[in-house]
Image (cartoon, coloured by chain):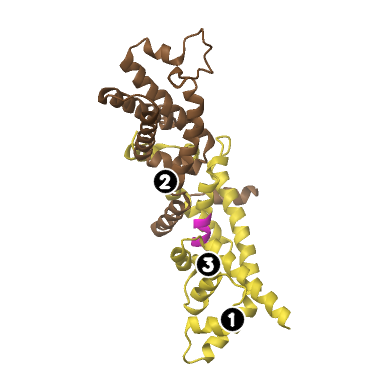
Amino acid sequence: MSQNEFKEFTQETKTNGSEKNLLSILDQIQKSLPSIPAVFGQLLLVHGFSSLLTLIACPQFGMRVFFPAEAQSLMDVFMVLGHEACFFLCGVFYLGSSFLFAKWILSSDSFLVIKRSRFVMVMSLALLSLGFFRMWGDALSFELTFLWFLGAYLGASLSTREWWKYKMAASQP
Amino acid sequence: MNRLNFKQLAERLSDENLLLALAQGEEEALSIFYQRHSGKVLRFCLKKGFSKESADEILQIVFLQLWRKRAHYSAQYKALAWLYILTKSETKDYRNREKTFARTKSIPAEEFMTDASQNDDFSPIKRQEELSWEGLSEVQKDVLTKRFYEDKEFSEIALALGKSESNIRKIISRAFQVLRSRKEEEK
């Protein structure tokens, strides 16, 4: 790097690039992002993988790999707080884990699309999961389903929340 | 924290923090960084002898690269040094592309334009058939038609086809290579 050239480069300018150029850049960025259906497909795959791991911790599905038979299962831990709390925490844990996996596995562009359409993504995934559980298990009451949904949205929101913004805001004088 | 709040925060952020926010996918950070420093990139390009149009094009390429390489930025680098290195590298690449483009452009483009001017009832589609752009893909034919028979700018073609300008240049360059090699085979 030529020091003189760099010094000259950093000097202030009177004029800036046009608004038209900026809009064109933002437009090209927008076009370069993967489509919502494509990202939702990727999210479904990640959710399938994450579900395999998270559901085997639940004895309701006949498996308790992470918890030996004599120990308390994750459900037992949640049930200490009551049946309703168990459903709520199940939602938090189940969807929260999926979105955390998505954050690690998917590309930053794909995860950006997820963050931008968070509400639709979370709701679609939660509804699909509920449908799947309904096929598998017993009938669900409105109250419990609502609590599970609430938990699922909270879990997914916490996993996709942009915590760095709070940290940056806090570090500002 | 919503988008509006972040805009207020971003205006107070240092250049380095703006690039860190950009690394997290915050487009607003790119807009503010552009408002602060796009003039520096333009001035650099003009000083290197590029035209205003080319400087504008390089400016877009540099800021697109800033977005694409956002994950590679680390707080240990000065933001302006990062921008300077990108600008320098992109101006060099642009110059090389221009040279390659000028070399490949000279033979077929002139022939095509001479043919076109000699024909009164010229129409781009008819000319395509007469010139027999055999071996070219549909996209290449489309781009060549738009560029040389409809006299469209690179930016217009890029917008129409949903591609970047550098991509359009590459498509044209590759199409010329195909036409040139076919011409040599015929000889």
Are discs 2 and 3 both within one chain? yes
What amino acid is labelled 3 in the image? Ser
Q: Chain of mark 2?
A: B
Q: Estimate how packed mark 1 is, as few (under 14), some (14 to 19) or many (20 or more) residues with alpha carbons within 10 Å.
A: few
Q: Residue furthest left?
A: A142
Verify whether residue B60 appears in magenta.
Answer: yes
Q: Chain drawn yellow, letter?
A: B
For this rendering, which residue is in front, A75 or B186?
A75
* x and y percentages locating residue B153 in the rendered image: 48, 71
Segment colored magenta: B55-61
Q: Nearer the viewer, mark 1 or mark 2?
A: 1
Chain hosting mark 1: B
Q: Residue furthest top?
A: A70
Residue type at numbered disc 2: Ile
Pointer 3 residue: B51
Asked if disc 1 and disc 2 are in contact, CB closer than 8 Å, the reply is: no
Local crowd size for mark 3, using a 10 Å CA cut-off: few (<14), some (14–19), many (≥20): few
Q: Earlier in the sequence, mark 3 or mark 1?
A: 3
